[in-house]
């Protein structure tokens, strides 16, 4: 019984991590339809985001334990790079600027919740992660 509960907990945590990473992937898929990733400054920021994603990926096995804060900060950096590029691309487009502002606000709340979750354990931590995913 305890082994099954442990496997279920690991599966739930895995789904939460997958959901968080999926949001980042969707954001970059949307971003590359707005900016040219081959352009000089854009390319540099994209490489910086890739480095951030490397840190995120290295933290995944311990994201609910010792590396939770590092995961949250690296994820925030990745999403910050995305928002910065969106902001750059939205110059002169009020509709896109409103979307970027909404994205920035939602991302700040989500990353903030991940940071808070890194200081808790158990069900409370999982619940905060679930809120961050919304």
Image (cartoon, rainbow, N blue to C red):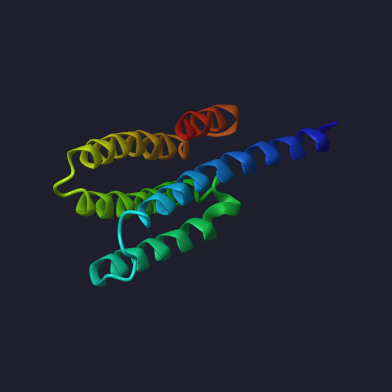
Report the number of discs: 0
Residue 5 position by quadrant: top right
For image coordinates 53% across by 31% down, the residue present is 130
Q: Is residue 91 left or right of residue 127?
A: left
Query: Where is residue 115 drawn, in percent x and y?
Result: 40, 40
For image coordinates 16% across by 49% down, the residue present is 91
For image coordinates 40% across by 50% down, the residue present is 30
Above/below status of 25 relative to 105? below
Q: Is residue 15 left or right of residue 128?
A: right
Q: Name the image quarter holding the N terminus.
A: top right
Query: Where is residue 114 drawn, in percent x and y?
Result: 44, 38
Q: Is residue 114 left or right of residue 86?
A: right
Relative depth, front residue between 81 and 42: 42
Relative depth, front residue between 46 and 61: 46
Relative depth, front residue between 3 and 45: 45
Query: Where is residue 83 drawn, in percent x and y?
Result: 29, 49
Query: Where is residue 68 drawn, in percent x and y?
Result: 49, 46
Q: Residue furthest left?
A: 92
Residue 4 position by quadrant: top right
For image coordinates 53% across by 60% down, the residue present is 58
Above/below status of 18 relative to 53? above
């Amino acid at each position: 019984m305890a082994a099954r509960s442990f496997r279920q907990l690991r599966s739930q945590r895995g789904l939460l991590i997958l959901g968080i990473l999926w949001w980042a992937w969707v954001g970059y898929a949307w971003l590359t339809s707005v900016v040219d990733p081959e352009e000089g400054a854009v390319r540099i920021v994209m490489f910086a985001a890739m480095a951030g994603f490397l840190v995120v990926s290295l933290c995944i096995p311990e994201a609910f334990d010792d590396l939770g804060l590092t995961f949250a900060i690296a994820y925030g950096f990745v999403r910050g790079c995305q928002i910065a590029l969106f902001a750059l691309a939205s110059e002169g487009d009020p509709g896109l600027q409103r979307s970027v502002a909404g994205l920035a606000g939602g991302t700040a709340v989500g990353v903030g919740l991940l940071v808070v979750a890194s200081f808790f354990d158990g069900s409370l931590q999982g619940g905060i992660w679930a809120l961050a995913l919304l």
